Amino acid sequence: MTQTILFNDLKSAYSELKNELDAVQQRVMDSGWYLIGEELANFEQEFAEFCGASYCVGVGNGLEALILLLRAYEVSAGDEVIVPSNTYIATWLAVSYVGATPIAVEPDPNTYNIDPALIEQAITPKTKAIMAVHLYGQAADMDAINAIAKRHNLVVIEDSAQAHGARHKDKKAGNLGHASGWSFYPTKNLGTFGDGGAITTNDANIADKVRVLRNYGSRVKYVNEVVGVNSRLDEIHAAALRVKLKYLDEWNMRRAALAQQYLEILKDAPIILPKTDPHNQHVWHLFVIRSQQRDQLQTHLTNLHIQTQIHYPIPPHKQQAYKEMNHLSFPLSETIHQELLSLPMGPHMTPEQIKRIGESVLSFY
Ligand SMILES: *Cc1c(COP(=O)(O)O)cnc(C)c1O
């Protein structure tokens, strides 16, 4: 019987580190302290250091990381925030959640990240921030974005949920704008066993604001300075993330080697392969190809017991949640949404699996 190739093999990721992960979970359980404790403080310090940023504040998930950053920068109703037209909808939802309006900008056709050349024409007197997403594991063109932001006095927030460890020139994601939101959702390059998130920044004031906002707006127990929320990164997750952080670079290198293998096998296939900007070190959160026969290709792979996914099937501006924007046209993003297919990728895949997937793609043509 043919073995199914999973899109995400989270169980193998756990198995590799089972002894260490089980030990730290037990340590937290035995400690009698489960929230805002030592594991979190240590993880925050270690992750800030990993990113090359001064501060990290753990929060409940990636969406709330972005929301709390927007609140810390006082982005609110009446404001506009520039976002990519091609992104996971969470980026937009964070903007909408604080009452501001997401203003979409089309991607660069090579990297699929927001195209800096198109940002300036989307700026109005209401624009407060640019949210750049490092999509699929590759950093956006941050020097160009930061230069535009500086000219217009805008805040630059990175959505680094897909880019743990990604580099752009001499810096890493999480240290490429004013502040960055992170997700530790299980499938991310650095993922926990449930929900988790964080922000990183070099701005002490913003770190402090998020730290207060995440905990009921309270610095001292039962003293509430602002209308905060409950968005905390549990000790049990912080402890697991501290273990997994030690392996992140190695696991990202495994992803990169598998991506190279895909690129080699598929180099002559009539599909569009992912392109890496020479200034970037890609961490291959996803390996995305494009085909005009995407749906048929996906069915072909499914029949050969290979799981694939689409990131993403419907662009944010075509979602019912954004009814008022359904009439807008972002042709490049729409084409990407129609053609894109994510092949299985992860640190626990084998060269044999990549070969089988590559040959299965070739056999479609
Ligand atoms: C995963 C993801 C998020 C949201 O993270 P959650 O932890 O699931 O809330 C935000 N933006 C992007 C680009 C993502 O991929």
Image (spheres, rainbow, N blue to C red):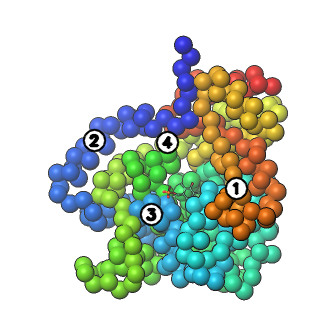
Q: Quick one: quadrant of the N terminus?
A: top right
Eye-nearest disc, 1 or 2: 1
Rendering coords of residue 110 (x, y %): 77, 52
Whichever of callouts 1 and 2 sits on the residue coming sooner in the sequence is 2
Q: CB atoms at circles 3 and 2 under 8 Å apart?
A: no
Eye-nearest disc, 1 or 4: 1
Whichever of callouts 1 and 4 sits on the residue coming sooner in the sequence is 4
Q: CA distance from mark 1 to mark 2?
A: 39 Å
**Is residue 135 shown above or below 309?**
below
The residue at 61%/77% (across/down) is 100
Rendering coords of residue 178 (x, y %): 56, 74
Q: CB atoms at circles 1 and 4 under 8 Å apart?
A: no
Q: Amino acid at mark 2?
A: Asp
- Tag on residue 198? 3
Residue 9 is left or right of residue 133, and the answer is: left
Q: CA distance from mark 4 to mark 3?
A: 20 Å
Residue 264 visible within the image: no
Eye-nearest disc, 3 or 1: 1
The residue at 43%/45% (across/down) is 247
Whichever of callouts 3 and 1 sits on the residue coming sooner in the sequence is 3
Residue pointed to by mark 2:
22
* Residue 324 figure quarter: bottom right
Rendering coords of residue 193 (x, y %): 38, 47
Q: Amino acid at mark 4?
A: Trp
Work out whether residue 161 or residue 172 is closer to the camera in this orientation and state it: 161
Q: CA distance from mark 2 to mark 4?
A: 20 Å
Q: Residues within 10 Å of mark 4 (few under 14, many from 20)?
A: many
Residue pointed to by mark 4:
251
Q: Residues within 10 Å of mark 2 (few under 14, many from 20)?
A: few
Residue 183 visible within the image: yes
Look at the numbered disc 2 and give the secondary structure of its residue: helix
